[in-house]
Amino acid sequence: MTLKGSLEDPARFISRRMQTVPASGIRKFFDLLSTIDDVISLGVGEPDYVTPEPFRRAAIESIERGETHYTSNYGLPELREKLSAHLERLYGVRYDPRNEIIITSGSSEALDVTLRALLDPGDEVLCADPSYVAYAPATLMAGGCYVAVPTYAANDFRMLPGDVEAAITPRTKALILGYPSNPTGATMGREDLVAVGEVAAKHDLAVISDELYDRMTYVGEHTCFAALPGMHGRTVLLGGFSKAYAMTGWRLGWVAAPGPLAEAIMKVHQYVMMSAPTAAQYAGIAALDEGEAFVQEMIAEYDRRRRLIVDGFRAIGLPTFEPRGAFYSFPEVKVTGLDSVTFSERLLEEERVAVVPGNAFGDCGEGFVRACYASGYEQIERALERIGRFVQRQR
């Protein structure tokens, strides 16, 4: 009998779809980071805070009570009720906790199951460029086609309604909004969002609004897209506990959507994940009950670091858009004569400071780097000193 193929070539089994999905542009860089000592990292988008003790205690107590089983596919009813009340209190948007809120294993799963529930093969999804690294791969893995809508520092990295409309084709199904933005720190005000919403309504698009960084808004107030007139019925709202409550490792996120959309999303979640981690859900209840003072304290500190890093980059000679949300700055490095990857690699090798090349987030990110200011204030000060030395040598 003749065997087809070669056991030495397992790659032949990989689907064509996954062959088109690139590895994260961040992965290679952080593989290099792990081999170098004495590094100040401004690369990882993670709070430097430990999850507050009341949240940890709630999880531990739930385990000690024996709450170690699956929850409802939708999540613990008490958590959904509190999250519903939380969204209504903050933004005036109402979701039925019984069937319009799904607790997920992080906002990354929320994005994945939403796209898989909404997209048919070949459907196009519009998204800002630059934007969060998972948007394009998650779209491709769901069978969709990702269409980048360029954004620029000159326009504060906002999605402009004219640019959105110009990118629409008969195959366009959905629009992803990710504001406050990872990586730029940009926000979109109410008027901006209303204008984009009018385009979405005109072309009958679904809108996936990823508002993971909603609480981290330093200039103006955050506008919840689903709360805008006429937008609730076409919007899937994504959020989570990772950033505002310093709970990245707990993997706790959520989806809120009108009943029929939520049911379709829940079916994907049901078969992929069953339910989010039970102990993490009890920690989430405590976060919503007891976390507001912590959130406000953390936001004030991030704002202090924001001013430090923006002023520091500008003093060094790197033009820097003022981030209005999240905890990222996006300095322009073209003035050094280096591209984003070369700048980042040489900065890491020569000065032991880690930033992320801007082109990891899309073509419009070339010429920029992402620097996260969720690190400690003194650590940012030291990093700026090292970056200043590096930039000076390029002149």
Image (cartoon, rainbow, N blue to C red):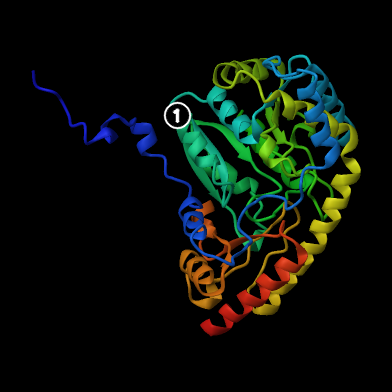
For label 1, the SS is: loop
Q: Residue shown at 9%/22% (left/top)?
A: 2
Q: Residue shown at 47%/64% (left/top)?
A: 341
Label 1 sits on residue? 143
Q: Nearer the viewer, residue 191 or 279?
A: 279
In the displayed structure, 258 sits above or below 324; it is above
Quarter occupied by residue 203: top right
Q: Residue shown at 13%/23% (left/top)?
A: 3
In the displayed structure, 195 sits above or below 116; it is below
On screen, residue 393 versus residue 177, left or right, reads left
Q: Nearer the viewer, residue 257 or 354?
A: 354
Q: Position of residue 14 (x, y in %)?
A: 33, 31
Quarter occupied by residue 265: top right
Name, please, the residue furthest toward the front: 64
Q: Is residue 360 visible?
A: yes
Q: Position of residue 33 (x, y in %)?
A: 52, 59
On screen, residue 110 versus residue 121, left or right, reads right
Quarter occupied by residue 79: top right
Q: Position of residue 185 (x, y in %)?
A: 69, 55
> What's the amino acid at mark 1?
Gly
Q: Is residue 198 visible?
A: no
User: Crowding at label 1, few (<14), some or many (≥20) Cα neighbours within 10 Å?
Assistant: some
Q: Nearer the viewer, residue 183 or 188?
A: 183
On screen, residue 79 versus residue 114, left or right, reads right
On screen, residue 19 versus residue 102, left or right, reads left
Q: Position of residue 273 (x, y in %)?
A: 58, 22
Q: Residue shown at 78%/66% (left/top)?
A: 307
**Quadrant that contains the N terminus:** top left
